[in-house]
Image (tube, rainbow, N blue to C red):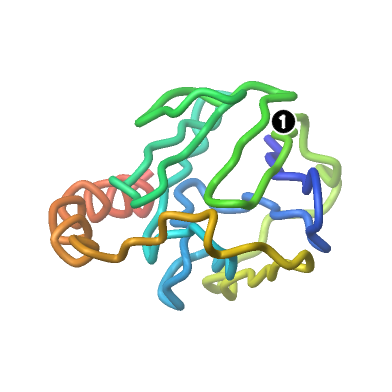
Amino acid sequence: MRAELRPRRGWHATIVLDRDVTLLGRDRQCDVVVDAPGISRKHCILVKTDGLVWLRDLVSTNGTMVNGIKVRSGALLPGDRLRIGLASFEVFLGPDTDQSSPPATTAPKPQATRVSLLEQFDFDLLNLNEEGGASDEERWSDELESFKIASDQG
């Protein structure tokens, strides 16, 4: 299944979700690094399974919105509008476009995708409080690790 987060405003790159489990955030250790206001170091995790993409917010400071509603977790459907911080995307789900090529014998870990914000924002309008970030990350580290282990095994 092909899964993408396509930019809605002010972004120059589509994020292709080419892994079964994708960690998204500002931290350089994330699979997809989004350098934008309002994005937590480890903001959310996206899991591809059974033709769907499941999202789980990792107790981010500013939350994750799907179709204008703040969510903690749930399935993303084609056409859904995803907002993390000030970054806004449309969800695309479809069949793989290149099914004729043989699978790779060894799959190297993909490099982190980096996207950056093109628009300027008024930071006074944001609540970018970083308090509690480390404890939030510690709180979710076990769950994040279990997602990664499940992805590696299956």
Give the amino acid at mark 1.
Leu
Q: Position of residue 115 (x, y in %)?
A: 68, 68
Residue at image position (68%, 55%) is: 103
Image x and y of residue 139, in percent = 13, 52
Where is 150 relative to 127, above or below?
Answer: above
Figure label count: 1
Q: Quadrant of residue 14?
A: bottom right
- In this view, 80 is above or below 27: above
Label 1: which secondary element: strand
Position of the N terminus by quadrant: top right
Residue 85 location (% of width, % of height): 53, 51
Residue 94 located left or right of residue 25:
right
x 36%, y 54%: residue? 152
26 horizontally vs 42: left or right: right
Viewport quadrant of the C terminus: top left
Where is 27 relative to 104, above or below? below
Residue at which label 1 appears: 93
The residue at 61%/23% (across/down) is: 67
89 displayed left or right of 131: right
In the depicted view, which residue is nearer to us: 88 or 95?
Answer: 88
In terms of image quadrants, where is residue 112?
bottom right
Q: Nearer the viewer, residue 63 or 114?
A: 63
Q: Residue at x 78, y 48 (%)?
A: 7
Nearest the viewer among 13 and 95 is 13
User: Going by the image, does 30 lie left or right of 18?
Assistant: left
* Within-10-Å neighbours for mark 1: few <14, some 14–19, many 20+: some
Relative image position of residue 98 (x, y in whole percent): 84, 46
